[in-house]
Amino acid sequence: MPVNRVPVRNFVDGLFVDGPSSFDKVSPVDGVVVADVHLADSVLVDRAVQAARRALNGPWGATGVPERVALLRRVADGIEERFDDFVEAEVRDTGKPASLARQLDVGRAVVNFRQFADTVSSEGLDSFLTELPDGRRALNYAVRKPLGVLAVVVPWNLPLLLLTWKVAPALACGNAVVVKPSEETPSTATLLAEVMAAAGVPAGVYNVVHGYGASSAGEYLTTHPDIDGVTFTGESSTGSAIMRAVAPRVRPVSFELGGKNAAVVFADADLDATIQGLGRSVFTNTGQVCLCTERVYVERPVFEAVADGLTAFARGLVLGDPYEASTTTGPLISQAHRAKVSSYLDLAVEAGAEVLAGGGIPDLGADLNRGAWIEPTLWTGLDNTARVVREEVFGPVAALVPFESEDEAVRLANDSPYGLASAVWTTNLQRGHRVAQQMRVGMSWVNTWYLRDLRSPFGGVGLSGIGREGGRHSMAFYTEPTNVSVQL
Ligand code: NAD
């Protein structure tokens, strides 16, 4: 494990800048301080927004699509060249297994830049030959312009993946960005600044400010009068605060928020494949993926078999050193988050849960016991009225609940204020389609989980967000079209 305490600076107008003060970033693996993060105050945030505005008003604002596409491809190549550095930085901040950081986080960052280079090169806008009843004719066509200076505020669970999911389309469309990574995971956004500069991204186009949310860099940025929009991933309550912050100036928002995702398992499902898929969907990244399943509804005849299989899966997970090849599962992101998840473990028991697996804090030896570890946990004996079945825990936990009929399964799965994702497990193809379409979510999988095509719409309903990103849906958010009507 690397234990050097590295400085993490802000990146403003093409330069790395210290903040007026700094804070310690602690490893969730063993509690050791791993980084010294420079806080951006309101003055520095303002400088970053002004730098982005100058870039937009300068040559960057006049770049054509081919030039931006080439730049995005150079950024993707640059991440690949420094792949191991990104993996190390992501592991240092999150404690996740290095194998996961390689495959999921850093691998996807490269793909994000290439995908949006492809999308922006191939997506057109509406054009109509207009023929009015009085005989007049016109050509109506829309041109796409950047939305402007964008605040990009992102969480800690998949730091580089979620950041680049927004920065790549934003730059593809010609915007300038000020990004505020999570205080828990400041490193990869900062490393990306080095790659951006080396790839030739002009000063001011990509800025990074560090700090916390409320009364700190996050709030300074989202309340800044000169931003043109906010793209945000994080908790639903934070999304609500950001909506209030931009409301007086009526700025557009794109929100990817929390989830309380359901899986529905029918008795005809391929149980071995289902249990592997369910296990992945509950426990990937220690349950800290917005798409993770926390509610598993199982048709009565196979309830015990699924409960046994998933329990064996949970008990087979290996918690430990992120660089050990056998490690499958890292810690939670912080002691504060562990305290929150632990409180839900207590609530579940108070509500009458039977604990099938986990349920507490593991003993991993003196060093790791200073980290933010928690046991992968499964419950039965709860229903949709229990708080742990209603509220997002964002940890390696799930409640298993039996159902009797397809209608009941749909009703139970949809009984949530969230609506991000769902998964249906069945070998009956018609039922798979039928149930998936009835889910009140943005994304519904059948016989798989987190299998993504980056051209498809991504987002949620209800408390899970506003808007869709992905492919042309991202183009729609990151641009303002101007329609031109030419009489013929
Ligand atoms: P969070 O909302 O606490 O923080 C996210 C970011 O917002 C951080 O950078 C934080 O500093 C900043 N922030 C906090 N308060 C702010 C404020 N008042 N003004 C401006 N910025 C503020 O979320 P988190 O704990 O970092 O991440 C976990 C949450 O993110 C979970 O709810 C999870 O479901 C959600 N999430 C959603 C998706 C999705 O695509 N829907 C993906 C990943 C995570």
Image (tube, rainbow, N blue to C red):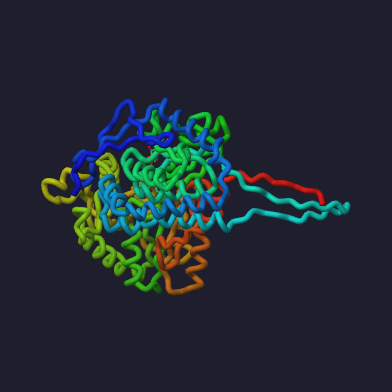
Q: Residue at x 36, y 40 (%)?
A: 182
Looking at the picture, how far across and down is residue 103, in whole percent? 33, 59
Quadrant observed for ligand 1 in the rendered image: top left
Residue sticking out furthest to the left: 366
Looking at the picture, how far across and down is residue 8, in whole percent? 30, 37
Residue sticking out furthest to the right: 134
Given residues 278 and 196, the one toward you in this image is 196
Taking the image as drawn, is residue 396 in sight? no
Looking at the picture, how far across and down is residue 20, in whole percent? 33, 26
Q: Is residue 128 left or right of residue 316?
A: right
Above or below, 116 relative to 270: above
Given residues 369 and 278, the one toward you in this image is 369
Above or below, 298 relative to 172: below
Taking the image as drawn, is residue 281 in sight? yes
Q: Is residue 38 left or right of residue 163?
A: left
Looking at the picture, how far across and down is residue 313, in whole percent? 26, 64
Counting every numbered tag in the picture gives 0
Given residues 293 and 288, the one toward you in this image is 288
Given residues 20 and 361, the one toward you in this image is 20
Residue 285, picture quadrant: bottom left
Q: Residue at x 45, y 44 (%)?
A: 201
Above or below, 196 relative to 411: above
